Image (spheres, helix red, strand yellow):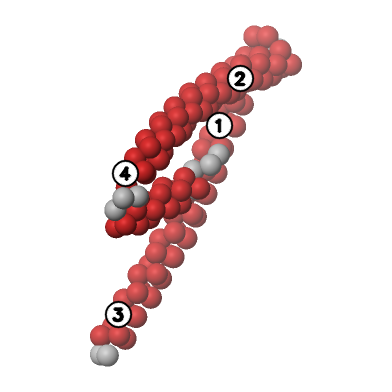
């Protein structure tokens, strides 16, 4: 019973430290994000300032917008390809799981001869179904 207050103190200290660390990290991440976004806007303005005397203000802004739109389209294309590849992998994985389940079901008649193995198989099947329920897209 003497250890209970010590344990509670350690737990609350750990939670308090975790809260402070999370809060500190959130503030520092937000500040870093502000710094990066300011640097980004300043960089775009600098590119515009360099291009404006050569082609004029409006064409320079249009050129920057076009380049950024092109980069955005490339990023979206890459993202689309990655999603497609992930869907293909998931379909292969699901097919392999269905094959495994079919193999398990085909062994079931042999397991029904032994009552203990039947219980183990039923529990394994329930565990398999439980693991599959959280894997839906």
Q: Earlier in the sequence, mark 3 or mark 4?
A: 3
The disc placed on residue 40 is 1
- Is 107 on the left-hand or right-hand side of 54? left
Q: Pointer 2 and pointer 1: residues touching (CB < 8 Å)?
A: no
Q: Position of residue 122 (x, y in %)?
A: 39, 53
Identify the disc placed on residue 110: 4
Asked if residue 50 shows in the view, the reply is: yes
The residue shown at (61%, 19%) is 73
Structural distance between the alpha carbons of marks 4 and 1: 67 Å
Considering the numbered disc 1 on the image, is that residue within a helix, a strand or a loop? helix
Quarter occupied by the C terminus: top right
Give the foreground label among 4 and 2. 4
Of the residues tagged 1 and 3, which is closer to the observer? Answer: 3
Q: Residue furthest front?
A: 113
Q: Which mark is residue 73?
A: 2
Residue 7 numbered tag:
3
Q: Of callouts 2 and 1, which one flags the residue occurring earlier in the amino acid sequence?
A: 1
How many C-alpha atoms fall within 10 Å of the one at disc 1: few (<14), some, or many (≥20)? few
- Point out the tag, 4 or 2, that comes first from the N-terminus: 2
Q: Residue placed at 27% from the left, 90% from the top?
A: 1
Q: Quick one: label 4 or label 1, which is nearer the N terminus? A: 1
Residue at 39%, 69% (x, y): give it.
Answer: 15
Give how far apart the Cα atoms at labels 3 and 4 are: 52 Å
Q: Quadrant of residue 64?
A: top right
Please tell me whether mark 2 or mark 3 is closer to you in this view: 3
Whole-angstrom CA distance, mark 2 to mark 1, is 19 Å
In depth, the one of 17 and 37 nearer the eye is 17
* Dots 4, 2 in contact, CB < 8 A: no
């Amino acid at each position: 019973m003497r250890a209970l207050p010590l344990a509670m103190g350690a737990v609350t200290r750990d939670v308090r430290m975790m809260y402070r660390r999370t809060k500190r990290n959130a503030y520092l991440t937000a500040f870093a994000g502000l710094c990066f976004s300011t640097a980004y806007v300043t960089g775009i303005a600098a590119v515009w300032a360099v291009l404006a005397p050569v082609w004029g203000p409006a064409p320079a802004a249009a050129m920057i917008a076009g380049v950024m739109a092109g980069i955005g389209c490339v990023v979206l294309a890459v993202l689309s390809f990655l999603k497609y590849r992930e869907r293909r992998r998931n379909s292969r994985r699901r097919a392999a799981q269905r094959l495994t389940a079919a193999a398990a079901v085909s062994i079931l008649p042999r397991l029904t001869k032994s009552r203990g193995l039947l219980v183990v198989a039923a529990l394994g099947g329930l565990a398999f179904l439980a693991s599959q329920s959280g894997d839906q897209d």
